[in-house]
Image (cartoon, rainbow, N blue to C red):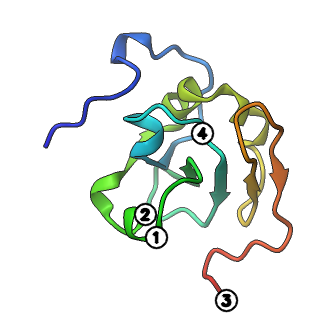
Amino acid sequence: MTKIYFLPKDQIQPLVSGYGAGLASDMITVDGLPVCFMYRESPRHDHDSGWCFMSGQETDEYANDIENLAYYNINTIVNYDRSIIPLLDAPIGSAFERNSSDEDFVEILDWNSTGD
């Protein structure tokens, strides 16, 4: 199935560079929801920044289905939600959340991506 993205390719502007790629949910790139949860793990490949971007509405079942996620240039995700820009330099192990796009992100201090 071909994905139809919320933002057409010709609307993606150069806003940031040098960050590599990040994993993002289709709820952001296809449905157009804002980023409300983002975390950074160790990169898995050369172009991976380690960032993962979610809307916060993904169920475990949805997030565990690889068809609902894809790697994108960080600039692409910034075009969907510019409010993430100030957080992109946060170190590996960082995580941030918010309840809606009109709120500021709050750092999750006890974040453990392994679920331990």
Q: Residues within 10 Å of mark 4 (few under 14, many from 20)?
A: some
Horizontal relation, residue 101 to residue 79: left or right: right
30 or 75: nearer the viewer: 30
Position above or below: 55 against 61: above
Give the labeled residue for mark 4: 19
Q: Given the current orientation, which residue lies at the most extreme top position?
A: 10
Characterize the local packing of mark 1: few (<14), some (14-19) or many (20 or more) Cα atoms within 10 angstroms: few
Q: Secondary structure at mark 4?
A: loop
Spatial separation of the CA atoms under disc 1 and disc 2: 5 Å
The kind of residue on which mark 4 rests is: Tyr
The quarter of the rendered structure image containing the N terminus is top left
Q: What is the three-letter code of the residue carrying label 3?
A: Asp
| Residue with the mark numbered 2 | 63
3D distance between C-alphas at marks 3 and 4: 28 Å
**Label 4, label 1: how far apart the Cα atoms are:** 27 Å
Question: What residue is drawn where x is 36% and y is 10%?
Answer: 10
Mark before the other along the chain sequence, 4 or 2: 4
Q: Is residue 18 left or right of residue 98?
A: left
Which mark sits nearer the N-terminus, 3 or 2? 2
Q: Is residue 5 left or right of residue 95?
A: left
Q: Nearer the viewer, residue 33 or 5?
A: 33
Instruction: Identify whether 25 is placed above or below 4.
Output: below
